[in-house]
Image (spheres, rainbow, N blue to C red):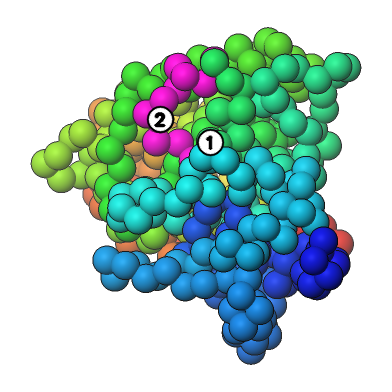
Amino acid sequence: MPAADGRELPGLDTLPGLVLTLTALPGELPAALLSRLPASDTYKEYAVKQLKRDNLLRTFYRNGVRGLRLTPTSKKLLTTSWPEQFLPYLSGSTETNMLKSEISRRLRLHRMAEVLVTMMNAGVSVLPWEKPDVFAPTPPDGALTLDRPAYYSSREVKGLGEQAVKIRGSRSTGVLLTDGGIFIVYNTGPGQMKWEYKAEMRLKALLEMVLCQERLPSQFMGSKQSSIVFAADMDQMAPFMGEGGDKRHNYFVLDGSFEHFYYLTSGHRGEVILQLLCYPDEQAALDDVLSQDLAPPRTGWVVENDAMDGGTPVLFAYTCDMPRIRRFCSGLERLSLAGTLYCFDFQEEALRQFCGPGVKVKCIDFEAYERSVFLSPENS
């Protein structure tokens, strides 16, 4: 698209335009995240080099952390060509325009960018101009509806204005809205999450009021909120599940604040499981396959279960719903019962740490699942 000075900017529907957009929204894009964008490695390398040659993108390297930032030229051209889309992010004293160099602030931006790319790759609407402005300071006229899963960054949630002051300090990166409900999203990265308990509870209360009562009651009235935490790998799950001496990382996960608190890895595997959370029909289809040769669940029983294998309770744990896994294992231990837990093969090692000797772990081949009909183009 020609800018005011006659220069050509790549279209926002091209890979170079996507790179600029994904850099503008969080403020800084981790260089390593380019590998997860939808294009060949050769083309991505060429596109980024061209953006740098055109003085639209630059590398910022400090404290051993490499990121991509927009140049002043790029910011000017984007805000001139698409003011409605980019002025809120690339003007004034906004955090995404006046970037800091402190490592803690940069890592926060990187974690937000990771979630943004994960959501996008899972088919979730992430671009502000492609979804209803649910968190506008003034509620829009008429009823709001969401026709597909949508992710709103914490920066968008703070667009509520004065109400958002109540959630200052929350570690959330944003909120995912789907037919399956409301998910508050976190990203612990390769480290351990340090919760701000009161701020997280205020965020939960604010979303209950704004989404369930005021702006989207037809879709979310009576909905219970859940939570998702992304991490670099499965190793970070142990502290959340109460393993180890430091209990500061699990009290928020397991204290009942959320009935469902899912642990997903950042990357392609997490994207696939995220799709299951976004589209309950796909999850139900997988459950139906796993339930073959099993008896229906025993509802209202002291041990949570998805099916019964004779007198043995079975839990489908491939979404890594941490409170649910803990309730299952604790119930078996109290009653001295055996049980069976189903998970994807890459989750097995981590989940075995939390299962007692009476729990049998059965694995779903992740690559085989991807080749199945459930993720074929006509069903995705």
Residue type at mark 1 is Ser
Residue 170: assigned label: 2
In what quadrant of the picture does the C terminus appear? Answer: bottom right
Nearer to the camera, 352 or 234: 234
Residue 50: in sight, yes or no? yes
Q: Residues in magenta?
A: 163-174
Percent of width and height locating residue 241:
29, 41
Nearer to the camera, 340 or 61: 61
Nearer to the camera, 324 or 271: 271
In what quadrant of the picture does the N terminus appear? Answer: bottom right
Residue at disc 1, secondary structure: helix
Q: Residues within 10 Å of mark 2 (few under 14, many from 20)?
A: some
Q: Examine the rendered structure and indicate whether residue 155 appears above or below residue 272.
A: above
Q: Examine the rendered structure and indicate whether residue 151 appears above or below residue 47.
A: above
Earlier in the chain: of badge 2 and badge 1, it is 1
Percent of width and height locating residue 121:
66, 60
Residue 154: assigned label: 1
Residue at disc 2, secondary structure: loop
Q: Residues within 10 Å of mark 1 (few under 14, many from 20)?
A: some
Marks 2/1 in contact by CB < 8 Å: the verdict is yes
Percent of width and height locating residue 94:
53, 40
